[in-house]
Image (cartoon, rainbow, N blue to C red):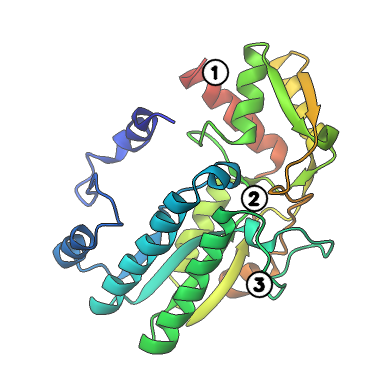
Amino acid sequence: YSPARKEANVAPFRAHPRYTLYRADFRDREIVRDIFRRHHPDVVAHIGAMASVRYSVQRPHLYTEVNVLGTVNLLEEARQNGVQNFVFASTSSVYGQTDKIPFVETDPTDHPLAPYPATKKAGEVLGHAYHNMHGLNFTALRFFNVYGPKGRPDMMPYIVLDRLVHDREIILFDNGDMRRDWTYIDDIIRGVVAALDRPLGYEIINLGRGEPVLMNDFIAMAEELVGKKAIIKGVPAPPSEPKITFACVDKAAALFGYRPQTSIGEGLRNLWDWYRREVA
């Protein structure tokens, strides 16, 4: 989607004296090295990546270059510059297709369904290597279906609202018989900040809501907000799509007091209010 949307998202922060925006590519080792040596950060939140399970199926080389090579560049500079804590944005997609719910951090994650989760699993494993070799504190946060205002327009919550507004067809996998653990952006941010403040050695931690929602129910909630009926086209789910995502967040609660606060009803309403104000 258009970089202009991302520029608009960061615009309010650019006047802050402690905010610096670099238009750069973290696949470039020299650029990453220069930024680290200018700023000497104590902590790193590595949120940047090529996202989207479905898009990764068509672009495996790009996803590997950005998500694996880029992560190595950041880990190496973190090591060389004495970073005290490295927090890595991973994904619930690493759990793949499983009947064991909810998803617990100790569950097997060796069978990703697409290149995107495979590259995120690689990032988790690289983090362990740097912790083992160099003592780098590394926390991988497995995000579950993040949504909210200013979110990506290729994510289902945005797509559903946008297509309802414009009376366009919504593609629904398996006739809506799939469940997603939608997690509001504010809850994710609170989790990231808490993790940055707590060096934990090496940890993998789920960040989710812990309440998966049936897609048909999600569509019905969106219909009520918009005041229109959805035009649905049901298709079989591709092999890259799991049947359910469902976070167990007990570990996050125990280690840094994580408690998701925003229900799907409130979060979707916030997204709709933003959409009407900024997009429609």
Q: In this view of the protein, can residue 200 be seen by the observer?
A: no
Image position of 26 (left or right of 241): left
Q: Name the residue under label 2.
A: 261
**140 and 210: which is toward the camera:** 140
Nearest to the eye among marks 3 and 2: give it. 3
Eyeballing the image, is 52 above or below 152?
A: below
C-alpha span from label 3 to label 1? 37 Å
Callout 2 touching callout 1 (CB < 8 Å): no
- Identify which amino acid the numbered label 2 is placed on: Gln
Please report the residue visible at 49 percent of the width from the left and 72 percent of the height from the top. 139
Instruction: Pick whichever of labels 3 and 2 is earlier in the sequence.
Output: 3
Please give left or right for residue 164 compared with residue 8 in the image: right
Please give the residue where the numbered disc 1 appears in the rendered image.
Answer: 276
Looking at the rendered structure, the secondary structure element under dot 3 is helix
Badge 2 or badge 1: first in the primary sequence = 2
Closer to the camera: disc 2 or disc 1?
Answer: 1
- Above or below residue 150? Residue 63 is below
Between 219 and 29, the one lying in front of the other is 29
At a point 60% along the width and 42% down the height, the residue shown is: 54
Instruction: Give the labeled residue for mark 3.
Output: 251
Q: What element carries label 1?
A: helix
Q: Do the residues labelled 3 and 1 touch (CB within 8 Å)?
A: no
Q: Where is residue 78 in the image (x, y as percent from the top left)?
A: 30, 73
x, y percent for residue 265:
72, 35
Q: Position of residue 200 (x, y in %)?
A: 49, 79
Q: How crowded is mark 2: few (under 14 residues within 10 Å), some or many (20 or more)?
A: some
Marked residue nearer the N-terminal end (3 or 1) = 3
- Residue 102: mark in rendering: none
**Quarter where residue 252 is shown:** bottom right
Q: Which amino acid does label 1 sit on?
A: Arg
